[in-house]
Structures are given as structure tokens and as C-alpha cells.
Image (tube, helix red, strand yellow):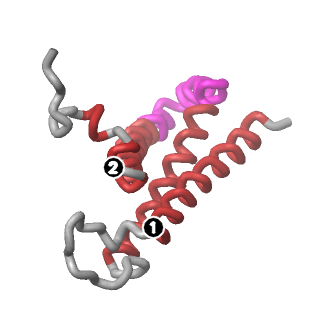
Amino acid sequence: MAKVDENKEGIKGMANPTRYGIERFAYLLMRLTGLGLLAYFVAHIYETSLILQGKVGWTEFLELTQTTEGHIILALVIGMSVFHTVNGIRVMLGHGGIGVGKPARPDYPYPAQSQNAKHKISIYSAIVLAAIAMMYGLAVMFGE
């Protein structure tokens, strides 16, 4: 039985958070939320264009969004928006040198100074804020 080369795991290896840590997970989640928000943007443009069909076309489509599935999709959009925004701010600050840490001599095993506790806390904060925003959105949509 042939052993799988650890560098040839494909997407399964890329998405493995235990191999690369929370930074790789945030990278993957940033890309996925970006694609999800792009899909929502296109769908929202289509939905908004239905107003040209008159009140009947607009109302028929809005009935589809006022379902349980529609509310769950909107809650996911809320979570994607919050995570993508907060993590994007973290990345921009890191590129600007804020919270990166002091330069160090590159001795093996080359620990990245940018992947310090401040950045890890901000990644976890982005995930927690997205979860709170989703719960709030669900409470508003399903609340009585």
C-alpha cells in the first residue's frame, strides 16, 4: 500500500486546520465567504431587477425569501459579511505592520512573527462576532 505524500493531499490537505493552524483556516474561510458574498451579490441584483416586472413579480419572489430556508440563507449572509469584514480588517492591519511583532533572525524552523497571539485572537474574535451576528439575525427573523 503506497503512502500518500503529505505535500500531495490536495484540497483535503489544504483544509486541514490541524496541519497549518488557525491562520490557514482563516485564509480558507476568507476565500469561501468572498465567493459566497459574490453569489449573494449576483442574486441580490437579480432579485432587485424583478421590480421591473411590477408588483406581482416582486411579491412572488419575496414570498420565496420569507421562508425558513430564506431566513437561514440570510443569516449565513450576515455571518459571512461580518467574518469577511473583521478578518479583512485584521489582514489590512497586519499588512500595515500593526500587531505583527518585531523582526527576528530567520533561524530554523522559521516561526513567523506575524502569526502571533494577537492575530490568533483576532481570528477567533472574527469567528465569534460572526456567530453572534448570525444568532441575532436568526432571532430577529424567527422571533415573535
Image: 33 above or below 104: above
* Label annotation for residue 104: none
Q: Residue 55, can we see it?
A: no
Label 2 – label 1 distance at C-alpha:
15 Å
Q: Residue 17, can we see it?
A: yes
Q: Give the labeled residue for mark 1.
A: 119
Which residue shows up at 55% across the image and 47% down it?
A: 79
Between 2 and 76, the one lying in front of the other is: 2
Q: Where on the picture, by quarter, is residue 46? A: top left
The stretch drawn in magenta includes residue 5: no
Image: 67 above or below 75: above
The residue stretch that appears in magenta = 45-70
The stretch drawn in magenta includes residue 46: yes
Helix, strand or loop at mark 2? helix
Q: Position of residue 119 (x, y in %)?
A: 45, 67
Q: Amino acid at mark 1?
A: His
Sequence-earlier tag: 2 or 1 = 2
Classify residue 88 as left or right of residue 109: right
Instruction: Give the crowd class for mark 1: few <14, some 14-19, many >=20 residues within 10 Å.
Output: many
* Label annotation for residue 20: 2
Q: Where on the picture, by quarter, is residue 49? A: top left
